[in-house]
Image (tube, rainbow, N blue to C red):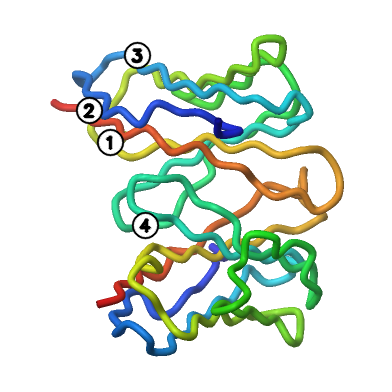
Amino acid sequence: QKEVEQDPGPLSVPEGAIVSLNCTYSNSAFQYFMWYRQYSRKGPELLMYTYSSGNKEDGRFTAQVDKSSKYISLFIRDSQPSDSATYLCAMSLEGGYNKLIFGAGTRLAVHP
Amino acid sequence: EAEVAQSPRYKITEKSQAVAFWCDPISGHATLYWYRQILGQGPELLVQFQDESVVDDSQLPKDRFSAERLKGVDSTLKIQPAELGDSAMYLCASSSPGQSMNTEAFFGQGTRLTVV
């Protein structure tokens, strides 16, 4: 079993829809949770990060962490065709030089 | 805007040949990472540097891969000899301990390697 599980999709939604992307994890010691967006043939771009539990909002994006369920989510409101990309969740332990553990990524297509 | 620079963007090499990738992190970033991303999968850490020292190379296939960051700034990742299974995107990232958290890493555009 992988430490971080993420449904690869693809997920296809109409423009304006609310998108929900999710990851589950097995290591309860993870404390930092991140979402990256990766366009085709590009490097990942950091979208959101959260420390421990709770919600964080940035424009149309909301990140949620539920440590009791070992479940994190990214919500995209009013989705746009430009949001079409692969979304990667990543997480890390606290302290030291801890590496990021990534999910497999979910491919999202927003069609006009 | 500061960014992580990588070269080349694309590389095609024959099996058993040597290949090298270069990365220049964001200025002042002490931590440098090399990740490998196979098509359809998430990135996996190959090696992590703190300044010029390796702090994690547990997933680096040391029989064929080597990495260095001699002056604690730019870095080179080498594969010799290349195998067909090495075809992937090689991503470099950097982060600074002075940022909000050590793991807020910024990625370069990557080098797409094809081994034929």
Q: Residue furthest right?
A: A95
Question: Mark 3 or mark 2, which is nearer the start of the sequence?
Answer: 3
Direction from residue A65 to residue B6 in the image, left or right = left
Q: Chain of mark 1?
A: A
At horizontal 49% and vertical 63% (from top left) the residue drawn is B91
**Circle 4 residue:** A42
At horizontal 86% and vertical 44% (from top left) the residue drawn is A95
Pick whichever, B3 or A103, lies toward us.
A103
On the same chain, marks 2 and 3? The answer is yes
Which numbered circle lies on residue A84?
1
Question: Mark 1 to mark 3: distance in Å?
Answer: 13 Å
Question: Mark 3 or mark 1, which is nearer the start of the sequence?
Answer: 3
Three-letter amino acid code of the residue under disc 3: Ile
For label 3, the SS is loop
For label 2, the SS is strand
Three-letter amino acid code of the residue under disc 2: Val
Question: Mark 2 to mark 4: distance in Å?
Answer: 18 Å
Q: Quadrant of residue B27?
A: bottom right
Which numbered circle lies on residue A18?
3
**Circle 2 residue:** A110
